[in-house]
Amino acid sequence: MRNLKTLLCLILIGALSACKKEVVVENKNKEKQPNIIYVLVDQLRYDALGYAGDSKAQTPHLDKLASQSMNFTNTVSVTPVCSAHRASLLTGKYTSSTGVVVNELRLNPNQRALGYILTENGYETCYIGKWHLYSNCSDHHAVECAYIPPGKHRLGFNGVWKSFNFHHENYNSYYFEDEPVKLQYKKPYEPEAQFDMALDYLDSASKKSNPFAMVLSIGLPHDPWSSDNVPAKNLEKFNTVAFDLPPTWSDTPDKYMDRNTDLESWLSYWKPNIPNFKKVYYAMVNSVDEQMGRLIKKLDDLKLTDNTILVFSSDHGEMFGENGRVFKLTFYEGAARVPFLVRWPKKITPGTTDALLNTPDVMPTLLTLCGLTDKTPDTVEGMDLSHLCLGQSGKEPEAAFMQGMGHTFQWKDGHEWRAVRNKRFTYARYLIDGKELLFDNQNDPLQTKNIINDDNYIGTANELRQFMAKKMKVLNDEFKACTWYKDHWVDKDRNIIKSAKGVF
């Protein structure tokens, strides 16, 4: 009997040992989640890049990156302005659901945001650069506006934090960490110092077992476009390049534009200065390219390239006088379309897709690429397009819905619009007078001819109207005047307390 018991014990120990070995093997074979680096630049047009066909652009590193990436050529910004885009990017929601209807509002922190999902699932996080979701005052340099304290207003980015809310002085500027104390960069040129921070972080993160997620939010090539706001070495590269007014320039500014509609200023300031502004802009883009080259090399040196998802994109574009407009916040191509490159050598085969990628789609797409599909919050309103990143066929958006909620930063009515863009057409409608516009982007890429009253496009116009109406109904987007949101969604201190989906 004793021998039988001994035999049974030996069998049991052997079985347990075998199970343990299987677990060990299984853990060894378990694929590590990819790292994420999301480089978000500011005000970069979709076409001001060499790989996009611009012969004036000097972007060799980004051109190479594009050749190694899935290039989403029909990417739009849901609301082509700084804060609204960022809120949508980090929450997966449309602007009517984040409540960020103008800049200089404080996003309600009660969000199931991207940072939370990544942190909760083992990711180390790092956020470097512009935030622009915390300010509720006009003095951007005041500590109470520029400093984002640790906690809920960082939306789950609980790791390394070297950020500020808003500024675009590229020299001798500052950032904050976890105390309300302005810290000076180690180098005078902010973008270079920020990329230095990113490279230092990679050195540290590469030694840890957990995956990391880093957002690098760079202010270039946002205005001011003055020669002292960009390195001379970059500016000199464009000394012999001719920059002109755009072919769609008009001596009369678009009356629906939210700023710069004074005719005298339009002709005396913008018309003579746009060519030189563009020269500085292209120098800034070249500077971005240089810094991206450093980042890409560091990934190679640390052998992080293969299992790192590297995204390069922008929050919106810049009109530079096209269609009677400057700056952003419009459905016209120059402002609405942005670059979007996704590289992951281990999984993504380089190529292009003309699928319509909108800002709310980014969060669910990234989460699925990271193996976190089931962790995507129910509050996300975008579509998961990860299969397109991987070169697979599958469902894609019929069109992209965009929302112009009012003025860029003031409570001022008269500039509200909604728009729908599919692979060929852009349809838009203004609130103030109901004016509709329809552009055939294939046959009229400069959007010079409004064909809304052309009998040949009645069916197209109706289809896009119906799509817009359906989308607005789903989102509970009531298309109100800008000041209505001030009275209903924001408190007296410019804190967002409500959106189209209710109280936060």
Image: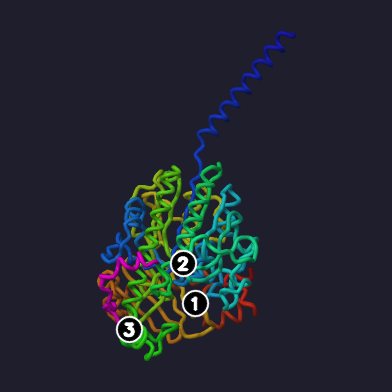
Residue drawn at 35 percent across, 47 percent down: 349
Q: Residue at 61% of width from left, 82% of height from top?
A: 487
Find the residue positioned furthest to the right.
2
Whether residues under marks 2 and 1 lie with C-beta atoms below 8 angstroms apart, the answer is no
The x and y percentages for residue 337 are 38, 68
Q: Is residue 234 magenta?
A: yes
Q: Which residues are magenta?
A: 231-249
Relative to the observer, which residue lies in front, 463 or 343? 343
Q: CA distance from mark 2 to mark 1?
A: 23 Å
Mark number, residue 271: 3
Q: Nearer the viewer, residue 458 or 216?
A: 216
User: Which residue is at the far bottom?
Assistant: 264
Name the magenta segment's main secondary structure: loop
Against 407, residue 175 (above or below) is: above
Residue type beneath disc 1: Met
What is the quadrant of the N terminus in the image? top right
> Helix, strand, or loop for circle 3?
helix
Q: To which residue does mark 1 refer?
A: 405
Res 268 visible: yes
Mark 2 surroundings within 10 Å by alpha-carbon count, few (fewer than 14), some (14 through 19), many (20 or more): many
Identify the residue under disc 2: 219
- Corner quadrant of residue 327: bottom left
- Magenta residue check for 418: no
